[in-house]
């Protein structure tokens, strides 16, 4: 990623992405996987307390929530109390608990029915308008809609990978689908450095190897970190393979384990912050 963003968002989030053309293919990959699962695989544990079927129900919840809120203006407050991650968890658990009454066949049917409606909704969106939902791991405030939609693509892709991990069916990682996931997660780089004070001009670089990878830079300006580009050698660099990177960003792998797999160079505080990068809402007690 090079250059800067455009419009009133300035350089805060880097070059805009338009991932909308990828949703049908990504959804088809997920549905093709689900169609081939056995009853035992639907019941297999995928996440703590959630089976494969529960993860699929959560994807359905994402579809329903976005159509209801963004298209229909039907917005329901999160359950009260606790932090934002805790309230989100409570809402997700409530939907999944009810959805256990829904058969796997019906879950697939509902995703097939609602997915194209989401595609139609996204096609009519102004990518540079303010998003309906903030992306808390990339900014403490508002963000552009293109970043919110890119986050939605990462959600769908990661949930497919969670199912694949649970049933031991690798795949779904073709470079043209994985690359925008990596790129989206890498937009968290400046925000992940926000608590590290350094002189203006300090440069940090995140390098992801392979055909789905690339290089993402952050530069220290007055009071903030912004997307690059970095001219010359950076003051800190972290090199990760894409599998390690997405698992770190999605917290399928802890920061300490990611550091063990990374190549790190330069400023230790910066590389530690970079290997704590997050691409999901973080629980309050999650280690860095």
Image (tube, rainbow, N blue to C red):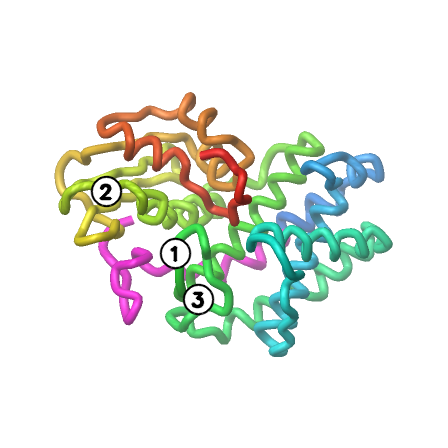
Which of marks 3 and 2 precedes in the sequence?
Answer: 3
Cα distance between the residues tagged 2 and 3 = 29 Å
Q: Which residues are magenta?
A: 1-28
Give the residue at the far top of this rendering: 260
Dividing the image into 4 quarters, which one contains the C terminus? top left
Question: Which of 113 and 222 lies nearest the eye of the viewer?
Answer: 222
Residue for badge 1:
139
Question: Which dot marks residue 11?
Answer: none
Q: How dense is the environment of label 1, judged by Cα within 10 Å: few (below 14), some, or many (20 and up)? A: some
Question: Which of 271 and 128 lies nearest the eye of the viewer?
Answer: 271
Q: Residue at x 40, y 62 (%)?
A: 141
Residue for badge 3:
145
Q: Is residue 117 visible?
A: no
| Residue 27 falls in image quadrant | bottom right
* Placement of 109 over or under 269, stated as above or below: below
Question: Which of 205 and 266 lies nearest the eye of the viewer?
Answer: 266
Q: Residue at x 42, y 21 (%)?
A: 260
Q: Is residue 209 visible?
A: yes
Cα distance between the residues tagged 3 and 1 = 13 Å
* Placement of 219 over or under 3, stated as above or below: above
| Residue 70 place in picture, x, y as percent | 57, 73
Q: Residue at x 39, y 57 (%)?
A: 140
State left or right for residue 259 relative to residue 83.
left
Residue for badge 2:
197
* Placement of 209 over or under 147, stated as above or below: above
Could you tell me which secondary element the residue under label 1 belongs to?
loop
Give the residue at the far front of this rendering: 81
Q: Residue at x 38, y 56 (%)?
A: 139
């Amino acid at each position: 990623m090079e250059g800067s963003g455009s419009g009133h968002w300035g350089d805060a989030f880097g070059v805009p992405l338009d991932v909308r053309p990828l949703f049908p293919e990504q959804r088809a990959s997920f549905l093709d996987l689900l169609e081939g699962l056995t009853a035992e695989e639907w019941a297999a544990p995928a996440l703590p307390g959630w089976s494969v079927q529960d993860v699929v129900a959560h994807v359905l919840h994402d579809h329903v929530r976005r159509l209801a809120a963004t298209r229909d203006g039907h917005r329901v407050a999160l359950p009260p109390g606790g932090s934002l991650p805790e309230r989100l968890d409570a809402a997700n658990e409530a939907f999944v608990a009810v959805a256990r009454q829904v058969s796997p066949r019906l879950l697939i049917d509902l995703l097939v029915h609602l997915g194209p409606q989401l595609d139609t909704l996204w096609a009519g969106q102004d990518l540079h308008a303010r998003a309906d939902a903030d992306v808390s791991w990339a900014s403490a405030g508002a963000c552009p809609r293109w970043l919110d939609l890119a986050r939605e693509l990462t959600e769908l892709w990661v949930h497919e990978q969670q199912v694949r991990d649970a049933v031991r069916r690798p795949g779904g990682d073709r470079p043209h689908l994985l690359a925008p996931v990596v790129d989206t997660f890498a937009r968290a780089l400046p925000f992940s450095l926000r608590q590290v004070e350094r002189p203006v001009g300090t440069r940090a670089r995140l390098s992801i190897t392979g055909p789905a990878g690339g290089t993402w830079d952050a530069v220290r300006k007055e009071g903030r970190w912004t997307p690059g580009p970095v001219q010359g050698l950076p003051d800190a660099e972290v090199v990760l393979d894409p599998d390690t990177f997405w698992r770190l960003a999605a917290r399928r792998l802890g920061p300490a384990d990611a550091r063990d797999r990374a190549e790190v160079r330069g400023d230790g505080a910066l590389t530690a912050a970079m290997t704590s990068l997050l691409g999901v809402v973080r629980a309050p007690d999650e280690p860095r």
